[in-house]
């Protein structure tokens, strides 16, 4: 399906820092589009703004500038009361399943909560649907009467997913859903998401700092750095032809578990600048191995490399965006 | 390492084990509970323990020192002190429990709303409650009871209202910490209206501190009501309330008839002590980060 | 003789619960490992495997209800488990140093970082203050902190995560330890910073000829920065050997599962029934601890699996591990293994 379920235009989010008068520039002009049935992966490190984007498009926090369109409707300045009923169709799965669930509520009630709020169901209908949801996420119905402390991380995350799909939402945002889980548990959760994605027609926004995980589940990938999308690309192309210097270094920093795999080390100097003091021009210029003078003053605009593949780098034209490698 | 038995031990054994485990975890709470239970039994089953009728006076036996007939002696009206002390336990509980319930019913919702909403509402509510706390409660209670009339009900109402800021503060503090936690955000993301967030999500998770305080506040209520009676406000003779009894007995201390004031005094101290012990020790049990004993 | 020799280390959790029942969990079971100068050992496993507990047991940093109930830890010829606390204190921070995750919470927030470096040097090496100060500057330089002179007076909260981690490493190295233990040193750090920190550790281990132990759940780190690896599960080392041997020819089904679960090898949709709950240390199954999640488990797994010598220096605790010189990965049918001692 081609229907656009979420569109953000020039999204900006600033957080004031105490009473100092300065701001954390978390999101600095982001455009994104998510269609029904597709998974957009957002990858970035700390300060990239990825979590903030996830919360902002769901209006869990208000944007400072820009517009958000959900299912065609402009929800940018919608009052909280009007946003609430929309939540039936847009849901979120959080990173830490232990803190995302009310520790004093029963699992069954937690899963049924969206049903009770948004749908008009009889008690038995609700019970049936809850059991069905538990089975769908491969969670034993024995757990429905327990509290979260009795379940493991993987099981809790399944509860969170059941909660998120309960009302058949059109958009699901997942903020690092597997990062807090053990390695052997992640696969199960990702598989579940893969299945759900095939079954529902929902659009997914999958946020992660781990490229490996993003690769497994996404159709398209957006790479974020300090609140900007520096590259947006269909999944496979990111790994075969990363264009932006940051994407290239991110890829190179990933450590595969094969000791024989040759590492193409592109160790960046320094650390990510603070979002309170954004570098001028292209935010990446302070660490970029191929930066030139123009990069310090000019914010690069997104350029199309091929259909569906765009990157924001001043050196794209002349091919200077590829960082020379030394292999190990 | 231990094999999992498929048959559970009988209820009484499990209960006994739980008791032992709890008392190991908090000797303080255990001691407190024992004392409170003792007075509870006395209050409920006073008839079984009293030797005489608490309000019958024996005019020929005024101010007799403790004897085989009157274990705690008699007071200025010839009434048996032992029976009066036993009966007085009813007032201890009869005042403390309703007063604490009123405090909780007022304080908890105020704390919830103030903590969650924040802003102007929070400021206004908290300033009012701070004002209440700063004012010496005895003076305030004296004034109110004197104005509205000397009755048990008035005392309970005043104490209940005066003590509600404590609960409001405790709940508010927890809510402030919790309102930015992820599960609350998750509840908002699910589309919960505010009332559900307050009562289904925040309340159950912010009430523990307040609940632990109930025993301590009950102790306060007992003490204050006794003080009021001692000052001549609220309950009066011949009602066998400890504070009133101490008031009456105070004048006889000088002349050497110590038993009139001391016995009700000891009872009062003991109950307050027990409530405080329990309130203190209950934290050990409720706190999820329990200290593990060896 | 190895620098560090841990034999049959046994650590249990022992306490009375709220029902007054005595509870005992076998948190570490007969842990054996050796380490020599210049070697980097990776200890890898999931939650509850006992990786951090091993390090804490070695350093004597256990708190109740955890207790060492058996075994020996020989460091530089000395038995650490029977040392009195004050002698152990002299070794900790000096000969054995530890770097942990969450660097910012490990630093004293009320003392400038330069002072903290000086303090730890003074505690163990004493001597004139300016020698300590000079050493601190040198260490800050060695760990790649830019402008050591200026940064000497910085407060911990002024540092970024990566910088704070470098400070922790500098602190660990102030007294030139023989053994450096890094417990999840890069968890929580950005991946681009992680690479810098790991490269730094590797370089420093070589430069100061230390023995080093890296505890992590990230197989990629072990694959590229360690020589030796020990895979832990439910308090036991279930496979041990060189990184190449264990990662390229894993003999234990759990190791195989773990490697298969890394994102680059994962094949979604091929019914990976991997993982499940972390093992309940209070209710361990008899025999092999991972039998509940092992696709190859049979009746024999209810007896204690032997530690099989798969190859020179490569051991695996599994009934089905083959003690051969050929590749010891998946065999067609489970068979009884020959007891090799």
Image (spheres, coloured by chain):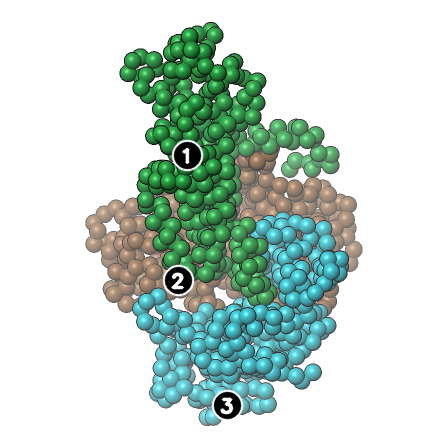
Asked if A244 appears above or below B90 in the picture, the reply is below
Measure how far apart labels 3 and 1 are at the Cα level: 85 Å
Residue highlighted by disc 1:
B150
Q: Which mark is residue A107?
A: none
Relative to C192, say whether B50 is above or below: above
Color used for chain C? brown
Q: How far, Cα to Cα, is label 1 from label 2? A: 38 Å
Give a yes or no on whether discs 3 and 2 share a subunit. Answer: no
| Residue A90 occupies quadrant | bottom right
Residue nearest the viewer, comparing C153 with A113 = A113
Q: Residues within 10 Å of mark 1 (few under 14, many from 20)?
A: some
Q: Chain of mark 2?
A: B
In the image, the chain rendered in green is B
Q: Residue at x 28, y 61 (%)?
A: C154
The answer to whether one can see residue A301 in this image is yes
Q: Quadrant of residue C90?
A: top left
């Amino acid at each position: 399906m081609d229907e656009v379920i979420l569109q953000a235009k020039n999204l900006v989010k600033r957080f004031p820092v105490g009473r100092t008068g300065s701001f954390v520039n978390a999101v600095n002009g982001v455009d994104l589009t998510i269609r029904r049935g597709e998974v957009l992966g957002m990858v970035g490190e700390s300060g990239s703004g990825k979590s903030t984007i996830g919360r902002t498009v769901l209006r869990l926090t208000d944007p400072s500038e820009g517009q958000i369109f959900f299912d065609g409707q402009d929800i940018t300045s919608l009052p909280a009361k009007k946003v609430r009923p929309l939540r039936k169709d847009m849901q979120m799965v959080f990173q830490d399943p232990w803190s995302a669930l009310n520790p004093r509520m029963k699992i069954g009630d937690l899963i049924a909560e969206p049903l009770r709020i948004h749908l008009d169901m009889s008690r038995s209908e609700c019970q049936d649907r809850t059991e069905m949801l538990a089975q769908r996420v491969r969670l034993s119905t024995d757990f429905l009467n327990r509290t979260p402390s009795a379940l493991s991380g993987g099981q809790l995350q399944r509860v969170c997913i059941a909660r998120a799909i309960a009302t058949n939402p059109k958009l699901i945002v997942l903020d690092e859903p597997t990062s807090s889980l053990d390695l052997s548990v992640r696969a199960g959760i990702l598989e579940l998401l893969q299945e759900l994605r095939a079954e529902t027609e929902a659009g997914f926004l999958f946020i992660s700092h781990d490229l490996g995980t993003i690769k497994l589940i996404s159709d398209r990938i957006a790479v974020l750095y300090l609140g900007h999308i520096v590259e947006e690309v269909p999944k496979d192309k990111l790994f075969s032809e990363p264009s932006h210097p940051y994407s290239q270094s991110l890829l190179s920093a990933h450590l595969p578990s094969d000791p024989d795999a040759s590492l193409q080390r592109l160790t960046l100097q320094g650390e990510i600048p603070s979002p309170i003091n954004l570098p001028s021009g292209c935010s990446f210029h302070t660490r970029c191995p191929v930066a030139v003078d123009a990069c310090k003053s000019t914010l690069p605009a997104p350029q199309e490399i091929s259909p569906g593949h765009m990157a924001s780098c001043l050196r794209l034209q002349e091919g200077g965006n590829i960082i020379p490698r030394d292999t190990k | 390492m231990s094999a999992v038995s498929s048959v559970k031990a009988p209820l009484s054994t499990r209960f006994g084990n739980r008791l032992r485990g709890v008392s190991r975890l908090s000797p303080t709470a255990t001691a407190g509970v024992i004392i409170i239970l003792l007075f509870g039994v006395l209050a409920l089953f006073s008839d079984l323990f009293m030797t005489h009728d608490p309000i019958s006076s024996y005019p020929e036996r005024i101010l007799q020192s403790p004897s085989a007939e009157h274990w705690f002696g008699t007071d200025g009206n010839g009434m048996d002190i032992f029976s009066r002390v036993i009966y007085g336990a009813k007032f201890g509980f009869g005042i403390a429990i309703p007063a604490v319930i009123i405090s909780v019913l007022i304080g908890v919702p105020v704390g919830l709303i103030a903590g969650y909403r924040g802003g102007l509402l929070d400021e206004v509510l908290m300033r009012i409650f701070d004002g209440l706390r700063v004012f010496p409660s005895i003076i305030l209670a004296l004034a109110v009871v004197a104005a509205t009339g000397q009755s048990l009900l008035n005392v309970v109402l005043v104490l209940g209202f005066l003590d509600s800021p404590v609960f409001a503060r405790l709940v508010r503090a927890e809510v402030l910490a919790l309102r930015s936690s992820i599960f609350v955000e998750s509840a908002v993301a699910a589309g919960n209206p505010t009332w559900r967030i307050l009562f289904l999500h925040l309340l159950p998770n912010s009430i523990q501190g307040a609940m632990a305080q109930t025993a301590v506040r009950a102790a306060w209520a007992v003490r204050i009501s006794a003080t009021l009676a001692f000052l001549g406000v609220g309950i009066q003779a011949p009602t066998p309330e400890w504070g009133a009894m101490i008031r009456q007995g105070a004048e006889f201390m000088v002349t050497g008839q110590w038993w009139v004031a001391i016995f009700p005094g000891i009872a009062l101290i003991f109950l307050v002590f027990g409530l405080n012990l329990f309130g203190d020790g209950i934290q050990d049990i409720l706190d999820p980060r329990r200290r593990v004993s060896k | 003789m190895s620098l560090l020799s841990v034999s049959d280390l046994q650590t249990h959790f022992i306490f009375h619960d709220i029902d007054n029942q005595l509870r005992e969990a076998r948190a570490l079971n007969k842990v054996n490992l050796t380490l020599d100068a210049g070697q980097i050992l990776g200890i890898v496993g999931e939650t509850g495997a006992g990786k951090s507990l091993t390090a804490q047991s070695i350093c004597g940093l256990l708190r109740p209800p955890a207790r060492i109930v058996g075994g020996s830890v020989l460091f530089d010829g000395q038995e650490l488990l029977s040392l009195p606390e004050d002698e152990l204190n002299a070794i900790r921070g000096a000969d054995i140093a530890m770097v942990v995750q969450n660097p910012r919470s490990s630093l004293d927030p009320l003392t400038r970082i330069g002072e903290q470096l000086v303090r730890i040097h003074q505690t163990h090496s004493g001597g004139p203050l300016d020698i300590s100060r000079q050493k601190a500057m040198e260490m800050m330089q060695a760990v790649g902190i830019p402008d050591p002179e200026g940064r000497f007076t910085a407060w911990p909260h002024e540092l970024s995560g990566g910088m704070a981690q470098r400070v922790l490493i500098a602190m660990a190295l102030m007294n030139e330890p023989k053994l450096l233990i890094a417990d999840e040193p890069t968890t929580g750090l950005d991946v681009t910073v992680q690479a810098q920190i790991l490269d730094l550790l590797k370089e420093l281990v070589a430069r100061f000829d230390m023995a080093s132990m890296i505890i992590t759940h990230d197989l990629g780190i072990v694959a590229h920065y360690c020589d030796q690896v020990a895979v832990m599960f439910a308090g036991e080392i279930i496979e041990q050997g060189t990184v190449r041997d264990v990662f390229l020819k894993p003999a234990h089904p759990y190791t195989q599962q773990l490697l298969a679960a890394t994102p680059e090898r994962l094949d979604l949709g091929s019914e990976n029934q991997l993982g499940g709950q972390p093992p309940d240390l209070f209710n361990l199954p008899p025999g092999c601890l991972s039998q509940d999640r092992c696709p190859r488990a049979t009746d024999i797994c209810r007896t204690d699996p032997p530690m099989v010598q798969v190859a020179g220096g490569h051991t695996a605790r599994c009934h089905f591990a083959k003690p051969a010189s050929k590749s010891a990965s998946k065999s067609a049918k489970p068979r009884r293994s020959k007891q090799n001692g």
